[in-house]
Image (spheres, rainbow, N blue to C red):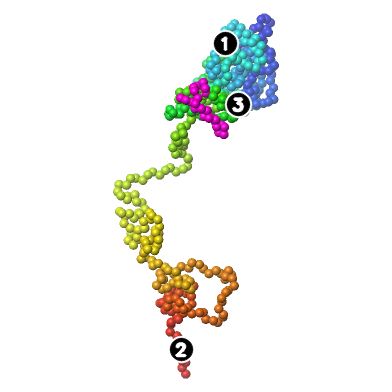
Amino acid sequence: MATSKTANTYNRQNWEDAEFPILCQTCLGDNPYLRMMKEKYGRECKICARPFTIFRWCPGARMRFKKTEVCQTCAKMKNICQTCLLDLEYGLPVQVRDHALGMKDEMPKSDVNKEYYTQNAERELANTDSTNPGGALGKANAPNDLLLKLARTAPYYKRNRPHICSFWVKGECKRGEECPYRHEMPTDPNDPLADQNIKDRFYGVNDPVASKLLDRASKLPRLEPPPDKAITTLYVGGLDGKVLEQDLRDHFYQFGEIRSITMVPKQQCAFVCFTNRYSAETAAEMSFNKLILKGRRLKILWGKSQGAKAAPGKEGGAMLAPVPGLPEALPPPPPASKPDENNFFNLPSASHPPISGIPLPPPPMSGPPRPLMGGPPMHGQPPPGLMPPRLPPPPGQRGQYPPEQRGPYPPPHRFMPPPPFLRGPPTNMPPPNVPPPQMSHGPAPNRGMAPIHYPSQDPHRMGTGGKDPAQAPPPTTVAPTT
């Protein structure tokens, strides 16, 4: 209990009279225009039981009013916030911070010893610039990897919400939306987080929040060494140009002899090769998620063997997840118990003879193509005897074939005459009323006929029975009767 100001003069000068509290960003809130209420010696500290100046404020809309709980001397010794009692730099409980730094601060808990310890700590803080924490924390080493992993860098304003309305839980709250408390169901009473003590938070013992964070830190991923014992190279990523080769050599030299360090500025990485596997494993274990050079956390991985490559469909030896929505692969066909049992398309083979009248396709050619004349036909040509070879037409009779050269199909026309408007002026036109010249060459059946330009003009295709109109008998005339 705090002593009276009039009854005790020994401890009167140690009463705290401050102008502004020591708070974290979360407790201050997001409102830059903050108004506080100040009261000198308004309450005693919950740790050292000395009167101190308390501050009270509202951190934001729909938030509860907050006030300082401990004096500034106790807050400076632990480097904590006066309201939430969390570390000012990392936002972690005192138990987690002390465990990460390997620090054990034995503060006395009895009244007389606690008062004497507090007076000495306050005298030491008065001789400093008050920028560094006092006590054992001011003598601790630099931050380590565990603090950087668990640190809360952004403010957590959800911690400033109002408390749960106990009347609403019992179904008796009549304020409705005007109630300043939260209308939510409380957590499980058996939850360890439901039982928190301010003194346990300050001294760093039996803190349920700290136990939860330490349990989470124990389950963080670890870097497993590769099964190939010949790999002694570590990959260092996240270099931004400030970390030099000498910085890496100074850090990894403590784990064993280094064979080489290869810097890749374009990829912002480096490869550190050790002479033996034991040194590489020690360096990987002590540097994975722990290596911080020039204020930057570096990524540590094991190097990969140059000869080993990932199999298709895998990434780093692990199967890739299937793409959703794609059809699955078809199952393989069942094994055939008989030859040609799986011939689903009825292809001709030894056990399936071809249909009568339809010959088998010619086998594909395995050698170079052979000429048409004097040798077997090439692939894709009909065998000899099915269609007679066609010779070019005689000169002067374009499109006209002799009867012995005519097949069951009309002769091909390789080009059509151009339209009249594209032919140009006529040349070598015969004079009018002049019969066309008689053909003196060509086959006998067509001698004396005009050239044939269209298949419809062929007399052999018009049902004339192969008779030439020029050789038809003249028409008979009948004399009129009188």
Question: What kind of residue is marked 1?
Answer: Met
Q: Tell me the number on the disc at residue 107.
A: 1
The answer to whether mark 2 and mark 1 are in CB contact below 8 A is no
Identity of the residue drawn at 40% across and 44% down: 330
Q: Which residue is mark 3?
A: 154
Q: Nearer the viewer, residue 107 or 459?
A: 459
Q: Residue at x 31, y 54 (%)?
A: 350
- The tally of labels here is 3
Q: Is residue 181 visible?
A: no
Residue 246 coordinates in the image, percent (x, y): 56, 25
What's the residue type where badge 3 is placed?
Ala
Residue farthest along the bottom direction in this orientation:
482
State which tag comes first along the sequence, 1 or 3. 1
Determine the CA span between mark 3 and mark 2: 124 Å
In the image, which residues are magenta?
252-276
The quarter holding residue 75 reads top right
Q: Nearer the viewer, residue 322 or 392?
A: 392
**Rendered residue at 33%/45% (across/down):** 335
Residue 377, quarter of the rendered image: bottom left
The three-letter amino acid code for the residue at tag 2 is Thr
Q: Is residue 468 above or below residue 74?
A: below
